[in-house]
Structures are given as C-alpha cells and as structure tokens.
Image (cartoon, rainbow, N blue to C red):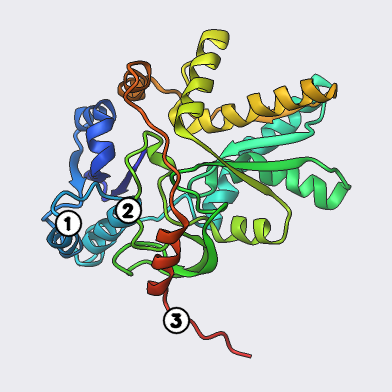
Amino acid sequence: MACNFFDLDLEVYMVKVSYQQKPYRRILMETYGAQVFASPTPLTQSGRQILEKDPESPGSLGIAISEAVEVAATSGGEKKYSLGSVLNHVLLHQTVIGEEALKQMDLAGEYPDVVIGCVGGGSNFSGIAYPFLRQNLREGKRTRLVAVEPTATPSLTKGIYAYDYGDSSEMAPIVKMHTLGHDFVPPPIHAGGLRYHGMAPSLCALYDSGHIEAIAVPQLGTFEAAVQFTRTEGILPAPESAHAIRAAIDEALDAKAKGEKRVILFNLSGHGHFDLASYQAYLSGQLTDYDYPIEAIQSAMQTLPQVSIPA
C-alpha cells in the first residue's frame, strides 16, 4: 500500500492520490481503528511546506515518509517509525519467497530461465530474485533476473545512480541508489506501491554491475495483461503485480516466436480486490500511458546532496 505506518495506535499517512484512488484500503484500515490522513497534510511542517508550494499536490511516497519521520522524531519517543521496502534488511526478510520458490521448482522438476518481479522500492523483486541470484553466483546458474517498473516511475531504467535522500524533506538517510530525485512527485498512475523516486541500495548496486535486468512497461499494457490473467487464471492481481505479469506474458510470446522452451517464474505479489476502482477506470477507458520525461530527471539532479567520498 502507498502509505507509511508508525505508532501502535495505527496513525497512517497515505499518499493523497492513493487515498483518493484506493478508498477500500483506507476504509479497511479505519475499520481496524486507524486514523488515516491524506499526505501531504497541514498537520506537519513537512506537509505544510509542500502545500504552500502546491496546494493541489497529489503527494508521493517521499513526502509521506517525511511526514511520518517528522511525527516520530518530534513525539518524544512515544511514536516509532520503521522504514521498509528499500532497506537491505527488509529485502533479506522477503527472500523467504524466493527460498520457497526454489523448493517448489525442485518439486516440479524444473528450474527457471527467467525470474520476474515488479519493483518500486525493491523488496518484492528482491524477495523472489535474490535466492536465484545466489544460485547464479555460487552454483553457476544463468537465470535472468528481471525487475519490472512503470514507465511513469522509471527509477532503474532512467534514474541516475547517485547519492540521494530517501524522502522529500531530506530527513531520511542518504543512500546511493538509482533515483529520479527526492523531490519527485509521480503522475497519478494506479500502481501506488511502485511510485517511489529511488530504489533499494543493494538492488541498485546489482543492477549497476549487470547482475540483474530492468525494464519499464506502460500502464495500459499492464492492465491489459492483468485482465487477461484474471480471465485465464481466475485471480485478480494487484496493479503492482500486473507489471510482472505483463513482462511474463511478453517473455512467453518471445519464447514462442523463437521456438524456445523457456521456464518463466514471476511473483504474484498481491490481489487487486481493493483496487477495483483502478480496474473500473481501465475498463471504462479512463486510463492513459505516461512516460516520465528525461528532462525532469536531469532537472532534479540539481538538488542531489553533495557527498564527499574519502580517498
């Protein structure tokens, strides 16, 4: 979900566009007793600064992180905040998925030629891919590992590999990652969990060294794949997961065209039952594609932190 949790009282800052697009997620959290705020809010200094510049700001994960960190940091220790998705320990926790997939492939008597996962911060893709990366490095396997992101938020495929802040207000740590700039405000695509300006540092290092691949797919093609998958398999995927499905279908079509046997493993990371509004928008022809312009990325690089590396 495009939101940040802190405090046992379930006080939630949810990216404003997700707050609007995903009402059922908000309602479920409120049913459990959470207070859910559309970020940016006037409740924090970070939020007020954003709203002064743009009263209609749709928000971003970077802004929501800033608000959550600020509330935790100024609470006198009463509130806690734990950053997830992009931090390496979270990626390692998620590898239980890939470890299980290794055993399942063994039971099936197969081994994947390609492993595919959607990627926004990195934990989902890394969870499925890192165990197979280990097999590549230690056992000499040659499995391709493909991270799939939206063309609207192309952190890996277009982002610059540099040191940057993890949030918009420069409160989170500086890390080296592929970034679109910490002041990035994404277009309101419906894959909320993939709308982050950066990426997990370890994943970025692996991409930079050529150990993994990355591709970007458009929103309309992604939803087309999701609908095809639903009508074939009877499972409604989350818009985020649908990015991996799009790439898996394209891999299968490529293998068919080349007359190759290709074992394809992808991670179906979530259902779309709380995303029916996005499916309604797609089916009624209201969605559009968006390619994030390289000019905006180049402009954002002017605000990167200046970091000196000791010789």
Residue 285 placement (x, y as % from top left): 35, 20
User: The C terminus appears in which quarter of the rendering?
Assistant: bottom right
SS of the residue under disc 3:
loop
- Alpha carbons under labels 2 and 3: distance apart: 21 Å
**Taking 270 as reference, is 122 above or below it?**
below
What residue did someone put label 2 on? Answer: 185
Q: Which residue is mark 1?
A: 54
Q: Which mark is residue 306?
A: 3
Label 2 vs 3, first from the N-terminus: 2
Which residue occupies 19% across, 34% down? 33
Residue at the extreme bottom of the image, as rendered: 311
At a point 44% along the width and 27% down the height, the residue shown is 238
Indicate which disc, 3 or 1, sits on the residue closer to the N terminus: 1
Q: Are marks 2 and 1 in contact (CB under 8 Å)?
A: yes
Mark 2 vs 1, N-terminal side: 1
Q: CA distance from mark 3 to mark 1?
A: 26 Å
Q: Amino acid at mark 3?
A: Gln
Report how many numbered discs are placed on residues in the image: 3
